[in-house]
Amino acid sequence: MEKLFSEDLVETDLSGLNDTKLFNKDLAPTKIIQRTWGTYNVASLWIGMSVCITTYMLASGLIAGGMNWWQALMTIALGNFIVLIPMILNAHAGTKYGIPFPVLARAAFGTLGSNVPAILRAIVACGWFGIQTWIGGQALNSLLSVLIPQWAAWNLSSAAGFLIFWAMNVYFIVKGMESIKWLEALGAPFLLVVGIALLIWAYVQGGGWGPILSQPSKFQTVGEFWKFFIPALTGMVGYWATLSLNIPDFSRFAKSQKAQMLGQAIGLPPTMVLYSFIGVAVTSATVVIFGEAIWDPVILLTKFNNPVIVIISLLALMVATLTTNIAANVVSPANDFSNIYPKKITFIRGGLMTAVLGIMIMPWKLLSDYSAYIFGWLVGYSGFLGPIAGILICDYFLVKKKKLIVIDLYRRGGEYEFTNGFNFKAIYALIAGVFVALIGLMVPSVRFLYDYSWFIGFGVSFIVYYLIMKKNK
């Protein structure tokens, strides 16, 4: 661990590569002078991304599914400590060499083959973009329903709210990240205030912590609990499985390995557990107050009688969702799409592709209930992203020994050309991991493979990749 902390940073001169098709300024490695993020900055990034509505819904979904408060928090904490490991490992190359995720993927998959993991990760990000946009759109719909009673009577009000909020996101994509910086500073604090306000409301209306936290688990046997816990834990890991791949997009700005490692350890698990507690406590309180678990905070806010509180809360929710969406769900897929054709697909064009695909993925279906969100969405895509993480970590630490020829990552015919730009060994390992992880969807007798999809996919692809790379050395 001490050796990882003390790794030197590497800067590569790529001034002669401006004419190559694999290079543009968005994918270029950061210079040493640009790597200015300390521990505080990295931790702040994670705190800002963790304090969001989907974190709240992650926790409240576990309560709605039958867990009691401590079972839900234990599941979330364990999942986040697990995913922190690949997060720190994949961040290493970003910090050392200043390269983003799609460029790092070229080392294992080839200069052109890297588009396979980049596109898979980008599609998942598009889904998250759609989910956050749907949440923000429903908050806008609820806000307009309070301000304009006629709006609530309109059959298409929900769809209209979604499209208006989607257009707001597109505006900031086109204007660029600088245009939203002033909002980013307000987003997480706004949502934190709303969360604390909901917690106070739950405490008062629910009769104190006793009635709220005494809500029993719905599972009658240990077997019933484990049947729910296993895929739920996979879902918790899957929640950050996307960022565990493209963390180099952010860690390439870190000033040292110590900064990225400690920053992530301080910022991710504690924040997720603390903000999840709000979701757990408030959702438990809704069982006491309303007789049912209300896992969607937008629906919960509309049940408040004071219109001023509802309006302020929904506005805060919209601002926080907007800033989180741009930072977490546009930056990375825009880079991934840019990797396909760097000379033609700019950040803005990649961001617009993300926005369009975000609608096509139909987020309203993914948020139809907690089961579709956790066991369908989070667990499902884990079967694709776990194998990619296994291959990247195996390649960088065991095959390449943390040594990359950065200039060859940006040109054809170099070290990472493999076979016409594709490392088919990595593709085969990816296919093997995905197949084993998802076979449980089609074969009920091995359903456990799907329930553990991220773990199974990671392990299978890691081992297969290592064995076939070692054999062909």
Image (tube, rainbow, N blue to C red):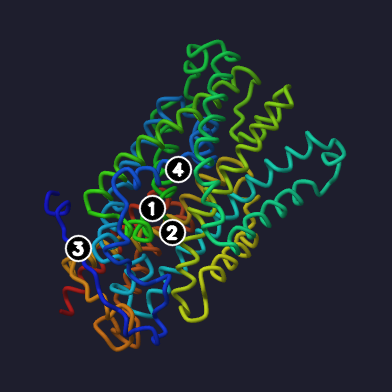
Q: Amino acid at mark 4?
A: Gly
Asked whether the beta carbons under mark 2 and mark 1 sit within 8 Å of each other, the answer is yes
- Read off the residue under disc 2: 438
Name the residue nearer the viewer: 399 or 334: 334
Q: Earlier in the sequence, mark 2 or mark 1?
A: 2
Q: CA distance from mark 3 to mark 2?
A: 27 Å
Q: Amino acid at mark 2?
A: Leu
Q: Amino acid at mark 3?
A: Phe
**SS class, disc 2:** helix
Residue 48's mark? 4
**SS class, disc 3:** helix
Q: CA distance from mark 2 to mark 1?
A: 7 Å
The residue lying at 35 percent from left, 67 percent from top is 432
Q: Between tags 4 and 1, which lies in front?
A: 4
**Would residue 62 appear left or right of 35 to someone viewing this image?**
right
- Read off the residue under disc 1: 449
Residue 397's mark? 3
